[in-house]
Amino acid sequence: MKHTLSVLVEDESGVLTRISGLFARRGFNIDSLAVGPAERVGVSRITMVITGDNRIIEQITKHLYKLVNVLKVQDITNIPCVERELMLIKVRTIEKNRSEILEIANIFRARIVDLSELFVILEITGDPGKIAAIENLLQKYGICEIARTGKISLIRESKINTEILRLNTANSLLNNFLIRDGGT
């Protein structure tokens, strides 16, 4: 299972090297990594996605706390959060499929950041599911290059889990469809 860890660290040189060294020595892989300044001066937030069971995540957390510059480690996997990623994607275009690609971009609210006769570069921001969905749709046109940020995430103070809301809305729409069409 993939876990998302939010780690607050002192903003000093070498902190990220020590953290990545810890993971390398223990044989753990980091699937996604994003680092940037946090809300306090001199503190950075590292958001990382790691594959492992609860025991492995607990072990990683204990090892992170042993590092001098680590202030707080939180597994936010099952906590309602706002999650975002940014992706730049270069897609091959030809005259006959350009309008289809631009329509997909429009549906996903992607920005066209470069357009040439043979290629389009799109900028997409959204939750990881949205990023995966547009990437999947654009595969058939010929993806030439992709650059993605790691996932960034903040805990929702409202405690509302939008994944559950989305699931409930989808189930409600499906039920209405089945009732309207006689369940067939």
Image (tube, rainbow, N blue to C red):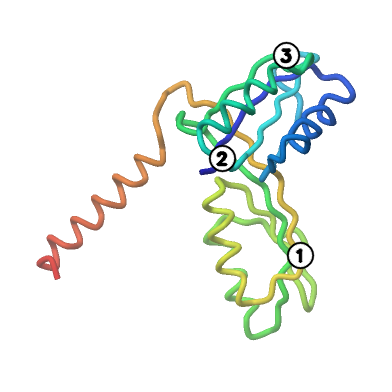
> At x 73% / y 60%, what residue is drawn?
146
Whichever of labels 2 and 1 marks the residue nearer the N terminus, that label is 2
Q: Residue furthest left?
A: 182
Q: Give the spatial CA distance, label 2 vs label 1.
A: 29 Å
Whichever of labels 1 and 3 marks the residue nearer the N terminus, that label is 3
| Residue 79 relative to residue 44: left or right | left
> At x 68% / y 53%, what residue is drawn?
87
Single out the mark in the foreground, 2 or 3: 2
Q: Residues within 10 Å of mark 3 (few under 14, many from 20)?
A: few
Residue type at mark 1: give it: Glu
| Residue 101 relative to residue 179: left or right | right
Q: Residues within 10 Å of mark 2 (few under 14, many from 20)?
A: some
Q: Quadrant of residue 64?
A: top right
Residue labelled with disc 2: 52
Q: Position of residue 76 (x, y in %)?
A: 53, 29
Q: Position of residue 8 (x, y in %)?
A: 69, 20
Instruction: Give the quarter of the figure containing the C terminus.
Output: bottom left
Q: Give the spatial CA distance, label 2 vs label 3.
A: 30 Å
Q: Residue furthest bottom?
A: 96
> At x 64% / y 53%, what residue is drawn?
124
Whichever of labels 2 and 3 marks the residue nearer the N terminus, that label is 3
Residue labelled with disc 1: 145
Q: Quadrant of residue 10?
A: top right
Q: Position of residue 170 (x, y in %)?
A: 31, 52
Residue labelled with disc 3: 40
Number of marks:
3
Single out the mark in the foreground, 2 or 1: 2
| Residue 184 relative to residue 74: left or right | left
Q: Residues within 10 Å of mark 1 (few under 14, many from 20)?
A: few
Q: Quadrant of residue 70?
A: top right
